[in-house]
Amino acid sequence: MTIWIGLTGGIGSGKSQAAAEFLYLGVPLIDADAISRQLTAPNGAALPAIREAFGDALFDENACLKREALRDLVFSSEEAKNKLEALMYPLISAEISRQQAIYSDRPYGVVEIPLLTEKPAFRALVDRILLIDCELGIRLKRVMQRSSLKEEEVRRIMAAQASDKERWAVADDILRNNASADELKEKIGRLHRFYQKFAEGKIK
C-alpha cells in the first residue's frame, strides 16, 4: 500500500522547490494546481460545469475560459468563489485519486496541495502532511522577486491564506526552508529516507 504525503505551505515558502526535489529522487508527485489548470484548459473537463454556473461571458469565441475574468469574479464575490470551489474540488480530488492508483506499487508518493490546510476534504487523500515553513520576510522577498508584485499585494494574498498557526496545527512534519537550495535538498533527502522507512513500517 502506497503512503501518500500531502505537501503544503504558504505562498513563497518553497513548496514547489521541495516537490521538485522529491521528484528528482524518483518519488511519484501529483500536483493539485496542475490538475486544476488541466481541468480548465481548452476542452477541459470542468468547462461545461463552469459555463453552466457562470454563463457564456467567461468564454471567448473559441470556447476557451477567460481565466482573468474568472479570477476577478472570484476575488470580488464570495458567492462566486464558493460556487467555483464546489464544482472544482470534487473534480480535482477525483483526478488525484485516479493518479494515485497508478502508483499503487510504490512505497510512498507526494501530493502537492497548496490549500491542504484551508480545505479539510483534501486531507482524506493523504496519510501524512508535510509543511514547508519559512520566515515571513523571506517569503515576501521571494514572491516579490518572481512576480513583480508590490509588498502590499503579496501581503493581501497571504492574508487570504491559512495562518502559520493553522498550518502547524495540521502538519505531521515541518521543514524550515529559510536557507539555501542546497540545505533544502539535504533536508528533503533526510525526509525521503524517513518516509521510505515509515512506508515499510519500520517507523511508527
Image (spheres, rainbow, N blue to C red):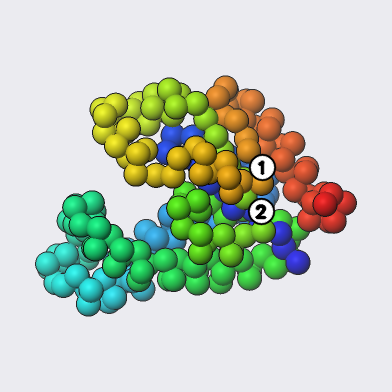
> Can you tell which quarter of the image residue 91 is in?
bottom left
- Contact? badges 1 and 2 (CB < 8 Å): yes
CA gap, disc 1 and disc 2: 8 Å
Q: Count the marks.
A: 2
Q: Name the residue type under label 2.
A: Arg
Q: Please tell me which residue lies in front, 164 or 195.
A: 164
Quadrant for the N terminus, please: bottom right
Which residue is at a point 52% across and 30% down the rendered structure image?
134
Which residue is at a point 24% across and 63% down the rendered structure image?
79
Kindly tell me whether residue 194 is visible in this rendering.
yes
**Comes first in the chain, label 1 or label 2:** 2
Q: Name the residue type under label 1.
A: Asp
Residue 10, image x, y percentages: 46, 40
Residue underneath mark 2: 128
Residue 60, image x, y percentages: 14, 65
> Can you tell which quarter of the image residue 111 is in?
bottom right
- In the displayed structure, 133 sits above or below 110; it is above
Crowdedness of circle 2 by 10 Å Cα count: few (<14), some, many (20+)? some
Q: Is residue 22 left or right of residue 88?
A: right
Secondary structure of the residue carrying tag 2 is strand
The circle drawn on residue 173 is 1
Kindly tell me whether residue 147 is visible in this rendering.
no
Secondary structure of the residue carrying tag 1 is strand
- In the displayed structure, 84 sits above or below 131; it is below
